[in-house]
Amino acid sequence: MSIPTVPLRIAVVLFPALTALDVFGPLNALNLLSIQHSMTLSLLSTDLKPVSIDRTIIDGVYQGMPSWQSPNLTQLVLPTHTFDDAPDFDVIMVPGGSGTRNLNLTKPHVDWLQGRMDDPNLQYMMTVCTGTSLLARTGKIAGKNATTNKAAFNWVKTVEHAEDVNWIAKARWVVDGNLWTSSGVSAGTDMTLGWIEHVYGRNESERIRIQLEWVSLNQTDDPFAEIYGLV
Amino acid sequence: MSIPTVPLRIAVVLFPALTALDVFGPLNALNLLSIQHSMTLSLLSTDLKPVSIDRTIIDGVYQGMPSWQSPNLTQLVLPTHTFDDAPDFDVIMVPGGSGTRNLNLTKPHVDWLQGRMDDPNLQYMMTVCTGTSLLARTGKIAGKNATTNKAAFNWVKTVEHAEDVNWIAKARWVVDGNLWTSSGVSAGTDMTLGWIEHVYGRNESERIRIQLEWVSLNQTDDPFAEIYGLV
């Protein structure tokens, strides 16, 4: 397919306790892609405060922090835009992480995604891992095929509107129209490489995979569905 | 082997234009490990300013930034300590990235690493990708076996003191005493899982690998050495 706009405007949604590799595996591939191809890469949050990686902080108090780990040692990434000042995007990616289990904390994210699902500019909506739960909660993927993290698969199926989604247990990632959803953590990078192949061609996805020294699973390869007893 | 101190004090060194996955693949594994095992995880830089991911900024000017990407969209991670106020560490990890090619920018990192290589507290020194070049420049790994990124292999061999290192072209990662060095990008996560197995046992490394839905290469599996014409 052809690239819809130049520069292609890509956004990654951030929330507290996002999973590090869910965000930075796909971004590493896209950062390499963006050296050769015209695109912008934005990071979105409710405000411009640093966002915690793999740990949740709410109102200055850390949740589920191991006693030996100081809050001062939390890993933090900076957003580039807030939801309120976000421009149009062609591609939106939603990572997963334990923060998705906090339904109040992620309500602004679900509300924003709900609006963007109706945006005619949107060419692709992509989710990694439990990021699919945020999208399911919008009610906008009813009737669609989708997958999610395998350890959290049965939890994701309990969120609001999840019963309307056609959940695929065994898949590294699933494509249904412009909706791309991946299995857990590392699967997001395989999906991103699959998306690069789809949009920019196999030579580009292989060039980047080899730069990352990354070993890919294909779209239907999913040993983890069996490990987690889902098939 | 037994775990040398509790909490185990781990530091990751940051510099501008670090490679995203070099840092956040290993950290994702360690963040999961740290929920069950007593350890601290610190991020070190020359100062506490945000550090750029996959892009270099020097004195407010971006280097090698594609014309379509705004400096405002740079991905940034926050350090937890400066080199000057860094406490003792048991484990130090050095990622790679294009920033390692800037010898002036990374001189403070090399100087700090040089001092820490003589620190009796240090149990493990680990490098990912071109991070090995920073360690080679300290002159403290003369005579040691080591590896590095395969695309950058021949460049790394040109840095100061690199001629004294026994470079291993075909290896996912190399262990020589307390020195652990990995091949490019994704190999750092395989090495980290190998280190978790070494210190905490196979059950722990497998538990974390499966949570990450990660497909590992073993220590001697390295298809990329051949792809890059190094063997």
Image (tube, coloured by chain):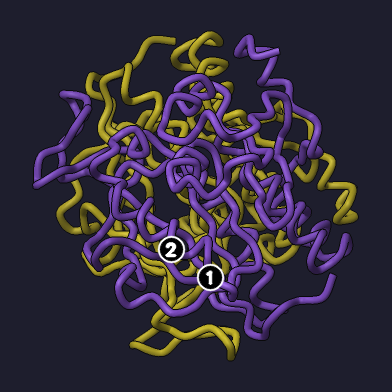
Chain colours: A yellow, B purple
Q: Nearer the viewer, residue A151 or B140?
A: B140
Asked if labels 1 and 2 touch by Cβ distance under 8 angstroms, the answer is: yes
Camera-nearest residue between B141 and B3: B141
**Dot label at residue B115:** 2
Name the side, left or right, on which A87 lies relative to B151: left
- Residue A184, placed above or below residue B79: above
- To which chain does the residue with label 1 belong? B
Residue indicated by mark 1: B119
- Judging depth in this view, the residue of A24 and A170 nearest the camera is A24
Percent position (x, y) of residue A5? 26, 20
Residue shown at the point (59%, 69%) measured from the top left: B122
Q: Is residue B34 above or below residue A38?
A: below
Q: Position of residue A45 (x, y in %)?
A: 30, 60
Q: Position of residue A71 (x, y in %)?
A: 43, 84
Residue A216 in sight from this viewpoint: yes
Asked if residue B162 is positioned above or below residue B7 in the image, the reply reads above
- Residue visible at 25% across and 59% down in the picture: B50
Q: Secondary structure at mark 2?
A: helix
Which quadrant is the N terminus of chain B positioned in?
bottom right
Amino acid at pointer 1: Asp
Is residue B204 toward the left or the right of residue A38 in the image? right
- The amino acid beneath tag 2 is Gly
Crowding near the residue tagged with mark 1, few <14, some 14–19, many ≥20 C-alpha atoms within 10 Å: few
* SS under mark 1: loop
Quarter-of-image position of residue B99: top left
- Snapshot quadrant of residue B230: top right
What residue is rendered at 47% in x and 85% in y? Answer: A70
Residue B167 is labelled as: none
Q: Is residue B104 above or below residue A209?
A: below
- Name which residue lies at 27% across and 32% down: A9
